[in-house]
Image (spheres, coloured by chain):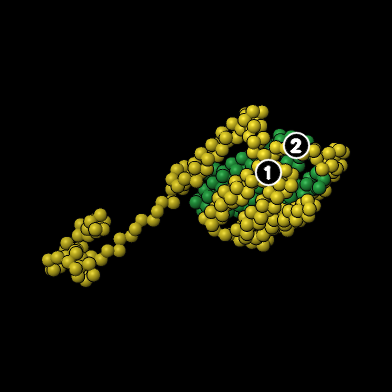
Amino acid sequence: MAPVFFFLASIGAIAGAFGVATLRNPFYSVLALVSHLVALAALFLLLRAEFIAAAQVVVYAGAVMVLYVFVVAYVGNQVEPVRAAGGPGLKVGSVIFAGALAVELLIAVLGSGLKGIDSKGAPYAPGFGTPASIGELLLTRFLFPFEAASFLLLMAAVGAVVLARRRGGLEAADEAEPQRIDFRLPPGSGSMAEGVGDINPTGHLDVRAALTPAAVPAPEERDR
Amino acid sequence: MNIGWYLTVSVIVFCIGAGGVLTRRNPLVILLCLELMLNAANLALIAFSRMWGNGDGQVFAIIVLVVAACEVTIGLGVVVAMYRRRVPIDVDELRELHG
C-alpha cells in the first residue's frame, strides 16, 4: 500500500508546486500551495514524522496561507502581463537553469553512494517522530535553537507591525486623507435645511452677511 | 519506498521553486516559490532523519518552519508597505530601496 500512497502524494506535491510556479492569478497560486502542503504532509506521514505533518497542516496550510489570502485580497489580484519585462530570453534561460539544477542535484544525491539511500531507512523504533520525542529533543539537546527561534519569531512580529503600520516613516506626505470639500450653499438660497429652520430662522435674507465667510457655520456646528 | 524516491521528489520540487523565483515578477508569487524551496529542503531533512533513525532532522525541519513563517511575515509586510506607497507590485519595476 505504501508505494501507492507515495506516488499519489508525490504526484500531488509536484503538481501543486507546478501550479504555484505557473498559474497567472496569485490567488490560484496560493490555493495550489495549500494542496501542495497537504500532499507534502502525507509524504511526511509516510516517513513517520507525525508531529511535523500535523504542524505542517495546522501552521502552514491553516495560518500562514490565511495570511497570504488576506494580503492577496488586500493588494488585489494583479494578473501579470504575459510577456516578461526581461524579454523571452530571460524566461527560457531561467527554465533551462532550473532543469540543469535538477539534473545536477539528482546526480549529486542519487550518485552520492550513501548506502542508506537504497534502503527503507533505519528500523522503526517505537516513539519515533511523536510529539513526546520531538519535544524532549527540543527542550534538552536543541534548547538553544529553540530559544533562538522564539526570539526570531518575536523580531518578525515587531518588524511586521513596524512595516505595515498606517502612519510613520514609511508613509509619504501626500498620502493624507483628502479633505472634505465644503459644498454648503450660502444662507437664503433655498436649501432643504433652511426649510426646517436650520440656518435662517428669522426668514429674511441678509445679503451682506451671507457673502461674508462668518455666515457659513463652522463644520462642528453643522454636524449636529 | 526507498529513501532515494523521497529525495527525488524533494529535488524536483526545489527546482520548480527555483524556476518560479527566476521567472515570476509578482513578489507575492516569488514568496510562494521560496516557500516551495523551503518545503523541499524540509522533505529532504525528514527523509534523512528517517534514514538515520533519529529525530535531529525533524527538529531541524521545525526550525525551518519557524524561519519560513518569519520570512513570510516580513515579506508580506513589505508588500503591504509597497501597496500603501502606490509602488507597482512588480519586482522589475523596483530599482531603489530608499523610503
Residue B64: give x, y in percent of width and height. 66, 40
Residue closest to the eye, B78 or B95: B78
Which chain did the renderer colour green?
A: B
Callout 1, which amino acid?
A: Glu
Q: How many marks?
A: 2
**Chain drawn in yellow:** A
On the picture, is A185 further left or further right than A54? left
The image shows residue B45, relative to residue A63, as above or below, that is: above
Expressed as whole percent of the image width and height from the top left, the position of residue A20 reads: 67, 55
Q: Nearer the viewer, residue B73 or A40?
A: A40
Q: Residue at x 16, y 63 (%)?
A: A208
Please say whether residue B25 is visible from this viewpoint. Answer: no
Foreground pick, A99 / A209: A99
The secondary structure type at the circle numbered 2 is loop
Classify the position of the C terminus of chain A by image quarter.
bottom left
Q: Quadrant of residue A214?
A: bottom left
- Compared to A164, does A141 lie above or below? above
Is residue A151 shown to the viewer in this render? yes
- Camera-nearest residue between A168 and A127: A127
Is B60 placed left or right of B48 in the picture? left
Q: Which residue occupies 80% across, 38% down?
A: A123
Label 2 Cα neighbours within 10 Å, binned few <14 / some 14-19 / many ≥20: few
Pinpoint residue A54: horizontal percent, then vertical percent. 64, 46
* Residue identified by numbered label 2: A125
Query: Mark 1 falls on what kind of element?
Result: helix
**Residue ID for mark 1:** A50
